[in-house]
Image: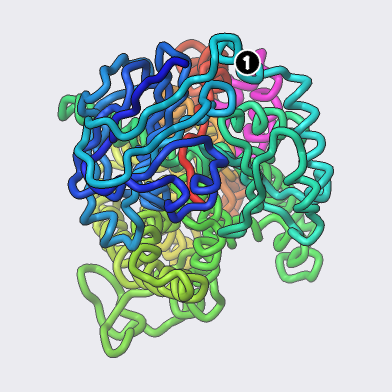
Amino acid sequence: MKQVQLLSPVTGQLIALSDVQDPVFSQGMMGQGFGVEPDNGQVVAPVSGKITMVAATLHAIGFTTKDGLEVLVHLGIDTVELKDNPPFKINVQVGDEVQAGDEIGRMDLAAIKAAGKQKTVILAVTNSADKVDAINAKIGIVKAGAIGADVDLKEAAAATKQPVAASGNKYDQLATQIIDNIGGVANVKSVIHCITRVRFYLKDEAKANDDTIRDLKGVIDVAKAGGQYQVVIGPAVNDVYDAVVKQLGPGFGDDDASMVAMEKEANKAAWQKMTPWQKVKHSFSALIGVITGSMIPVIGLLAASGILKGVLALLTSFKIVSATAPTYVIINAMGDSVFYFLPIFVGFTAAKKLGSDPIIMGIVGGVLTYPAIVAIATTGKVTSHLLGMGINADFFGLPVHVASYTYSIFPMIAGAWLASKLEPWLKRVIPTVLRMIFVPLLEVVIISGAILLFLGPIITALSGALAAGIVKIYQLSPAISGLIIGGFYQVLVIFGLHWAIIPIVANDIATTGHSYLNAIVSATMVAQGGAVLAIAMKSKVASMKELAWPATISAFCGVTEPAMYGINLKYGRAFVTASIGGAVGGFLTGLMNVNMWGFAGSLIGFTSFVNPKGIDFSFWGFLIASLVDIIVAFTLTYMFGFSDADVKNVKTAPKKKHLGEQAA
């Protein structure tokens, strides 16, 4: 009988596997092995061979030896929950060859203890059933790199027995059986996986037949924790997960949730190798990615609502529907609700993108759009001014400026980012039995407070300074002002700074009946439409055309969000070419002193350019500027701003597997 040795990966007290405080390992579900209670943080390779897996959360490393042993080293228990700030430094990666005893990383024992987790290091031979007769652990004090166990391998005939092949039929059949016994597809909300388990979020766990699932060939056990129904599979979990997702269909596999930790680690490693200028470019690119990723799920709704608002503008312009009639109110609610309550939707989608709790961020969005808050922002009495902000409220006696957050995007994205940092910390410091209540309570209070008391006022102050500058530039030269505003207005929209211009426009119309500034803003909407029109006509990708045509109509109806967030900003160059078109259109609008007598802009708002006293050059100037606007944005985008390769690169980017695991 052939015998090999497993080295202890750490220094400390070596214990029997059955004494490990994790039933998945202690009951041998992951194979035979042993545990070690470490005294210091050095981690070494227990065998010579190839690194086959490094968890995204860095808490688990897999090895394969020349004898075919598959060895898993698991650092700590429940340490997967520390994914946002892993207490590990691993200096090997998948594909590396290591020698037994080589240092492969370190673990911060103090940080693990402070987080309330167990530091036990577990070693398991995951293919023990095929390869191992017995593992004889050397119980007692052991040093890292010393022999921790003798392994009796099976006879040659048995040793050459191949592990279960990744047969599609075998795993498809197991996936079918699991789905049937958890209540069917209709009972599944979403599914993710880790190193050993397929983790289902079920609508009703009572419908799952635990005993039947446990008895399925290929299933080790069933566990329930953290709102998940966990089917313990073992090393074949990737194959079973893929088969499950294939049968459930699109939309069930939660790739965003699965990839958060992995993406953070990859970004961290890449960041360290960047030059300062590359870091600036990367940061900006990441910000745009978060913004567009947060908006994509609601783009279709925004496009549909934009078209509906355009139709309503036509109905009112031609006096078919009165702006005070119930018909108008009902249709306006249909078209405007998605914009009015946008903070709620963006809070949810941004949280999924950034790894915080979507429901909590949706509630924060509800706080910002709560009627009483909106009333303070829009009708509250201004008692004083500070840094250009009107102080319209107080919080425990502290004077504050409450801004209006309906229609806003950026504050919620910033809030979701803050929540992604706050939430893991709260979970570390709050006892498990209290988390259900106090994590959401504190998160809603802190994030809402941060936006209302700090982020909002900062944006308002920046907007106020920006507005003052725009007014001065316009007074100096309408044409130069048109060039600058036309080129950068949609950039202001991204960061919520455009709200500074709205009060100026409203004041102009209220006091003089018209607004030159609003005419320039209208030109930027036309430019976004011209750019996305070029994409709609150029692209041969069906999914792109399906999105681009409604976005074009919506932009020409005065709602640019679908064009901007759904396409132009997402593919970068198209946003630049659209902005150039906006600059040209804005320049002509200012040069020709085009005036505007209403709020509705873009092509659908053509009646706003009709002087109530009779058509003058403003109307013709609007048509000329809009036509040039479209030609420039369309031509530049068609020639330089977009190609179908951009879409294909996004669509064919390989999806990463989630490698994090949470011990039961």
Q: Residue furthest front?
A: 1
Q: Residue furthest bottom?
A: 397
Apparent side of residue 435 relative to residue 401 in the rendered image (left or right):
right
Left or right: 14 as drawn, with respect to 320: left
Q: Which residues are magenta?
A: 529-556
- Foreground residue, 346 or 490? 346
User: Which one is in front, 340 or 433?
Assistant: 433
Residue 280 in view (yes/no): no
Q: Confirm whether residue 387 shows in the render.
A: yes
Residue 275, by quadrant, is: top left
Compared across the picture, whether 80 is left or right of 254 comes to: left
Q: Name which quarter of the figure residue 177 lies in.
A: top right
In depth, the one of 255 and 359 nearer the eye is: 255
Does 93 lie within the magenta span? no
- Find residue 156 and report its horizontal and vertical position in percent: 54, 10
Please name the amino acid that badge 1 sits on. Answer: Ser
Tell me where residue 199 appears, x and y as whole percent: 62, 45
Res 260 → quadrant: top left
Q: Main secondary structure of the magenta part?
A: helix
Q: Position of residue 83 (x, y in %)?
A: 38, 47
Q: Where does label 1 land, which residue?
A: 539
Which residue lies at the image location 33% right of the left edge and 84% below the top edge? 395
